[in-house]
Amino acid sequence: MIIEYTGAQKLKGSLLFFEPVAGVQYGEKVVIRSEEKTVKGKVVALSEIVMLIEILGEPYGLNLDDLKVRFTGNTFELGVSETMLGRVLNAFGETVDEGEDIHSEKRLAIGGSAYNPAHREYPKDFVQTGISAIDGLNVLVKGQKLPIFSVSGTNTNALTAQLVRQIRSSGKRSAVVFAAIGIKYEDARYLMQSISEGENFDTTSVFLNLADEPSINALLLARSALTFAEYLAFEKGYDVITVLYDMTNYCDALREVSSSREEIPSRKGYPGYMYSDLASIYERAGILQGKEGSLTQIPILTMPDGDITHPIPDLTGYITEGQIVLERELQQKGVYPPINVLPSLSRLMNHGSTGLHRRWSAEIYAAYAKAKKAQMLAAIIGEGEMGKAEHDYLAFGKAFENRFITQGENEERTLEETLTIGWELLKLLPPESLTRLKAEDISEHLNK
């Protein structure tokens, strides 16, 4: 028997104030009906005086006088199945492409469950992205969470689509789960077209949330995508890479929902619990003992005003294991992807690369840092007043940006190709300046 309750008090935006009902649990899924309109909802606050329900849809057309609520007794769950690969889904796991409906194998709570740190294995296996600035200098390893910090004016859409198309783990079964959060319609159309044209789309699942949807849907979508990724990784044995784009839209939705609940704001108007909320997203990655699969995360966010100290990148940096930083100036030079390798970092790189790779990377970093100093000096005194050493580093810096960082939007480089380009660039410098390489490294790779 279906029981519906009346008792709506007021409607404020997407929040429904309702009389308390005995036995209702926090986070419970509800169905709201008014005349011919039916929407889903979620219980977000409980007290002896009032119960707060978040409406997951458009609240327009709901009439308080005849509004009825049905409590399902369940928290939000996602139906999961391997047939969700190669499909485009919404925050509720419903298909939004032209394919057939998906018959789920089981249902899982989208909140997930905490991983016991004692049951985690340390990330150590290299994951190839096909992008030299990452594979060569900021290695991603299986089970890591490595964010990308973007700025407005850079071609983040193209880089995101390229990562989703190309990135794959070296495991026997690999998959990508792409969560597009709060994306504009024109950006979504580009991303969907670009990703669907890739050869690996049949092992890719897209969760899509558009900018005109209710803010709460953005919060649900990130968790739905991670729930499916965990199912593939820890129940089906896949090595899964989850790309979350754009986490700034997620945080803005969190701020909007918090403001509508009249919660006390913290830095920049964001809720004080944003750190723990982001941690509940980012910590859903890793390798678990006794499980064949793994879950790797690449959160992508746009730094507001290009400020890396803004709460969103600041808190993200505390939780994750490094960052890839995009730079507007490189984009203006025509460099794609515009990755500034100097402030970029992968804290787990040493565990996913060989000793030779690490020495090669350190030498590349040092040479490019000296090239940037030489560029600053040239801007002050002019190149004609500079010595031969500075000219060598200027030439290295230009070649590094044009040959190493720059690559096509559809160009997928192997690690061997990336390393080869780096060795060729180091030949532009005198051997005595290469202090981070061993003598045998120079003899084998540079004296040919």
Image: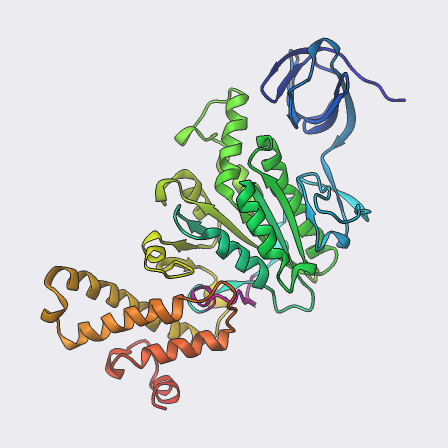
- The residue positioned 44% from the left and 69% from the top of the image is 136
* Quarter of the figure with residue 387: bottom left
x and y percent of residue 166 in the render? 57, 64
Residue 228 is left or right of residue 349, and the answer is right
- The residue positioned 71% from the left and 46% from the top of the image is 97
Q: How many labels does the image show?
A: 0
In this view, 275 is above or below 41: below
> Is residue 403 visible from the viewing direction of this image?
yes
* Quarter of the figure with residue 330: bottom left
> Is residue 289 visible from the viewing direction of this image?
no
Which is more toward the observer, 277 or 268?
268
Which is more toward the observer, 158 or 229?
158
Residue 68 is left or right of residue 204, and the answer is right
- In reply to whether residue 349 is colored magenta, the answer given is no
- The residue positioned 47% from the left and 46% from the top of the image is 301
x and y percent of residue 66 in the render? 75, 11
x and y percent of residue 216 in the render? 60, 31
Which is more toward the observer, 253 or 395?
395
Residue 238 is left or right of residue 250, and the answer is right
Range covered by the magenta-colored residues: 123-135
Indicate the quadrant containing the C terminus: top left, top right, bottom left or bottom right: bottom left
Indicate the quadrant containing the N terminus: top left, top right, bottom left or bottom right: top right
